[in-house]
Every structure is written in structure tokens, then in C-alpha cells.
Image (cartoon, rainbow, N blue to C red):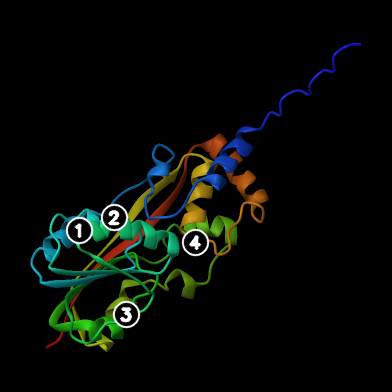
Amino acid sequence: MAKPVPPPPVRHSRFETLVAEADAAPIDGWDFSWLDGRATEARPSWGYQRLLGERLARVDSALDLETGGGEVLDGCPTLPPLMVATESWPPNILRASARLRPRGVAVVSTSDLPFADDVFDLVSSRHPVTTPWPEIARVLRPGGTFFSQQVGPASVFELVEFFLGPQPLSTRESRSPSHAVAAASAAALEVVDLRSESLRTEFFDIGAVVYFLRKVIWMVPGFTVEQYLPKLRELHELIERDGPFVAYTTRFLIEAHLIE
């Protein structure tokens, strides 16, 4: 009797391979090294981590909000005697705790500011989802500083609108620096520095897009590969034909002092 012939191996298309790989990649923490060689994003000229490190070295107490996996804070060479970081997403809490607690940082699992009034000389946050201006003012000491790099208006909206279609003006301008200045002023914080930049971003393959949208969850809320499979295939074909998909990231730096 002839031996049964095994079925031929399943051959996946390049599209299927790239999408499956990106859909299976871990997305905890705030480390984007998985995208190395697959996507690029220009960095703001001001160098937020360096500037933050300079400020941390000059104070006695500081609070870092939405610290992610603690990557930015850990990159600062000198931390003050009282250093607290908050994070609310469980995978990030574990990463931040492992990274920061050996350096004496108290990592608090919270999305609020459960601290007493007038405690911190400096409050910082890199890319906060929201900025609780009144609470920041409450926990700062008189003359204290809020220092933050934030996502600006219509950031990477070339990609967002590819999937969601044209967005209303109110959505495009929802992260305008002018809104931040007004909110700071209403909380008795005086803005002393405000800078904005638009930065070229390129996605070299569809896997990079899938990973980015899975990790930066507010870009296309509720994104899943299954839901957006036709649009992903369309974008894959566009990249394969025309080269990298280009979008523009917007960032602004804001520094404000609590009015004494």
C-alpha cells in the first residue's frame, strides 16, 4: 500500500505573515523598539528626557504621571530624594516597578492623584492621555513646576483618517496647545515655555501599522485586525506599490509654574 502523501505546507502571503507577526507581538510598556527598521519618527528638537533630567536634579520632590514602563524616568541620571511615579495599566505597573523601585521610586497604581496638597516641587508627564490641571496645581508646592511633552493636534491623522475617514474639526483640534494654556491658566498655573513641532513619521510595512495601532490605542479606538482587515490589505498594497506610508506626528512642550 502506498504511503499517504502529506498535504503541502501552508504558504502564507507576505501580507498575512506581516499582520500575524505584528498582531502577536507584546505591547506592554512604552518601548517601541519592535518598530526598529519598520517605522521611523523624527524626534522633537528640544530633547524632553534631557530637559526633564536637568529639572529633576534641582528639586527635592517630584511626581511623574502616567510613567508607562518607567523608561523615560529611568533614563534621567539623578532623581530627587522623594520621587513618585503613577501608572494605571497593569502590564506597565509591573514593568515600571521592576525598573524604578531599585532607584528608590515609589510606583503607585492609580489613574488619580491620591496625594496631599503642596507636596511636590515638580510634576511631569510625557504624553499623558489627559492632564488633570486642577489636581496638578493642588499637589504642587507654591512656585512648583509642571513640565510635560504632549501629543499635539491631529497627530498621525493621515493614518487615523485612512481607517476612520475625515474627522471633524473639533476632533482634529482637541489637543491644541492653546487649550492647554487656557486650562493651565484656569488652574492658577502660569505657562513659561511652549513649543510645538510637526515631525515626519514613516511606516515601511503593514506590520508596523498593526503594531502601532494596537499599542497607541486611542488612534483608532477599538482597533482589531479582524475589524479592519480590508483597510489593512488596502494599505499594504499601497505601501508595496508606492513605498512608506507618511504621516506627521505633532508634539508640544509645555512648562508652567504654580503662581505663588
Side (left or right) of 41 relative to 187: right
Tags 2 and 3 touching, CB below 8 Å: no
As drawn, the residue found furthest toward the top would be 1
- Image: 4 above or below 123: above
Residue at image position (39%, 40%) is: 36
The residue under the point 40% across, 36% down is 37
Q: Which residue is mark 2?
A: 99
Q: Nearer the viewer, residue 111 or 247?
A: 111
Q: Which residue is mark 1?
A: 103
The one of 248 and 40 positioned closer to us in this rendering: 40
Q: Nearer the viewer, mark 2 or mark 3?
A: 2
Residue 10 lies left or right of residue 185; in this view the side is right
Mark number displayed over residue 113: 3
In this view of the protein, can residue 46 be seen by the observer?
no
* Res 178 quadrant in image: bottom left
Look at the picture and state if 55 lies above or below 225.
below
Q: Secondary structure at mark 2?
A: helix
Q: Give the image location of residue 173, x and y in percent.
A: 42, 72
Residue in front for this viewpoint, 121 or 150: 121
Q: CA distance from mark 4 to mark 2?
A: 27 Å
**Residue at numbered disc 4:** 219
Crowd class of label 2 (few under 14; some 14 to 19; many from 20; radius 10 Å): some
Q: Amino acid at mark 2?
A: Arg
Of the 4 image quadrants, the one containing the C terminus is bottom left
Element carrying mark 3: loop
Label 1: few (<14), some or many (≥20) within 10 Å? few
- First reached walking from the N terminus: tag 4 or tag 2: 2
